[in-house]
Image: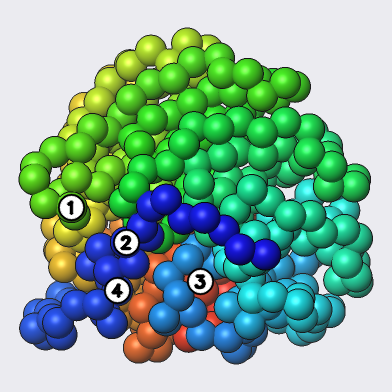
Amino acid sequence: MSFKKPFILAICAMPFIAACTSKQSSLPPLAPVTSSVPVNTVWYKHINASTKIDFTKFTPAVDGSQLFASDVNGDVGSFQLNNGSDNWRTRLKKAASGGVAVGGGAVYVPTVNGELYALNEQNGAVLWHVTLPDQSNTAATYANGQVYVKTIDGKLVALNASNGQTVWTYDEGATELQLLGSSRAVVSGNTVIAGFSDGKVDAINANNGQLIWQTIVATPQGFSDVSQMVGVFADPVISGNAVYVASYHGTISALDLSSGRMIWQHPISNYAGIAVDDDSVFATNTGGTIFAYSKDDGTVLWKQSALHGRELSGPAINGSNIVLGDNEGNVHWLSEQDGHFTARTFVGKSPIAVTPLVVSGNVIVLSQNGNVFVLRLAA
């Protein structure tokens, strides 16, 4: 099938895309972590093809004892979370275009020809596959018997998880120039939250696809094409009665879940992602600085600039720390309380662009050369 593309995907816009930029000068060496907590490697292995050229978010997923991953060759695999052994592998007819989602006994994978596949979670057999309005460059989302998938033409599609039939399609529209990659939808009860490339966050009724509210969190600034690009490329996070969302060339914002009312907002340029705990919101900006904000009123609690220029992944919560990766293959742990470094480990020269996944204290790190590492802080 073919697609009409009324817009351009700006694959050279992000600083971590080395193929599109001149070689950066060497970064200063990292200062040692004082009183560092030891990091144990539970296991590691090469599980999929390199994604160093295609910077779509090939996020893994976990369900129970299984870890699922996809790659640019269309290989989808299930691995034992405790030791990395293979459960099954399936090769799709087309290359995958985004990460995996799991739920309802199935694994969901988008492909470059604009399809979504559902595979049996236990054996990898194809249950169904359907054609989407356009290609999706992010993982789908499963909730309450439906699968939600965003496409690069600015649509959000709700599918029946049992057979792939379309329940409804919401059309926000797409900007003429946007970054490669996208954020996934998130769900709370009967509300689906989705951020789009035009800098808008929409709340949509899960039953009928009708708009509940819409809030603008980023508006184009400047005169160049790159400076004009905005959009919500980091996954929104729902916590309590608020939605926390960060945007590229825009802001980090807390919105009321029921109305979309702005609770607080700060300027930031964020692509990689955010994390939220009981008290704070954590975000990395595109320059490599890490910020902690008060969850209630947005007060800046601390910022850590020691990793400036290292093109960080999004942060994840790991106990009383946040954990993230950088473009030189380092994994960093920082105290949630004040941002000081508590641990660090090097897992190889390949960049870590995907936000680590934390499951039961294990930190799952996927590098761009297709290696997966399961790490754990020593007790």
Q: Residues within 10 Å of mark 1 (few under 14, many from 20)?
A: few
Residue linked to disc 1: 225
Nearer the N terminus, badge 1 or badge 4?
4
Q: Amino acid at mark 3?
A: Val
Q: Position of residue 290 (x, y in %)?
A: 24, 52
Q: CA distance from mark 1 to mark 2?
A: 10 Å
Q: Amino acid at mark 2?
A: Ala
Residue at image location 56% in from the left, 18% down from the top: 211
Residue linked to disc 3: 365
Q: Residues within 10 Å of mark 3 (few under 14, many from 20)?
A: many
Q: CA distance from mark 4 to mark 2?
A: 11 Å
Disc 3 secondary structure class: strand
Q: Are marks 1 and 2 in contact (CB under 8 Å)?
A: yes
Nearer the N terminus, badge 4 or badge 2?
2
Give the number of the mark in front: 3 or 4.
4
Residue linked to disc 4: 17
Q: CA distance from mark 1 to mark 4?
A: 17 Å
Residue at image location 44% in from the left, 20% down from the top: 214
Q: Position of residue 371 (x, y in %)?
A: 54, 84
Disc 2 secondary structure class: strand
Would you say residue 204 is visible in this rendering?
A: yes
Residue linked to disc 2: 10
